Image (cartoon, grey):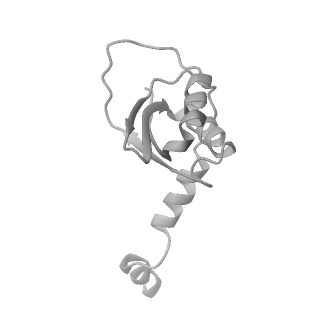
Amino acid sequence: MIFLKEIQITLPSDRKTLMDEFIKEFSLTVTSYDFGEAIRYEFTVGNSQLNHLIEELKSRAVGSAYGEIIVRPVELKLTSREKADSLPESAGVNREEIITNLGNISGFSKTYLLLCAS
């Protein structure tokens, strides 16, 4: 079973060339929306390719110096044709996902206090 992630990248319009080069380099099938001052790109990748993709985007300062990257799990994807992926596979879980999940589950809660009081 292949698990997919939807990647949504929003960048200022003046960074269009950078993203166009990135899309061409990795042969991604992307849907883009032009909002005038910003452009949104949406595409899906397998979990095994996510680490490599995020690292490549970060190396181009996407999501850190400008723009934003949103990663969402895909519950279901129906497509009429299969295409070979050009991104290399990587083992493990994305570092950003781990940090986000730890931040969401850490801290005090009623359950934690109840367990400590027992």
**Is 88 drawn above or below residue 70 in the view shown?**
above
Give the residue displayed 31% in from the left and 31% down from the top.
76
For the residue pair 43 and 78, the one nearer the viewer reads as: 43
- The answer to whether residue 91 is left or right of residue 79 is right
Q: Indicate whether 109 appears above or below 75.
A: below
Q: Position of residue 109 (x, y in %)?
A: 40, 78
Residue furthest out toward the bottom: 117
Q: Nearer the viewer, residue 110 or 12?
A: 12
Q: Which quadrant is home to the C terminus?
A: bottom left
Q: Residue at x 47, y 83 (%)?
A: 116
- How far across and down, in percent of the image, does residue 53 sit? 59, 36
Which residue is at the front of the view, 71 or 109?
Answer: 71
| Residue 15 position by quadrant | top right
Residue, x 51% and y 35% (percent of image)? Answer: 47
Q: Quadrant of the N terminus?
A: top left
Vertical comparison of 62 with 85: above or below: below
Location of residue 80 (image quadrant): top left
The reply, left or right, for residue 59 in relation to residue 27 is right
Q: Is residue 1 above or below residue 37?
A: above
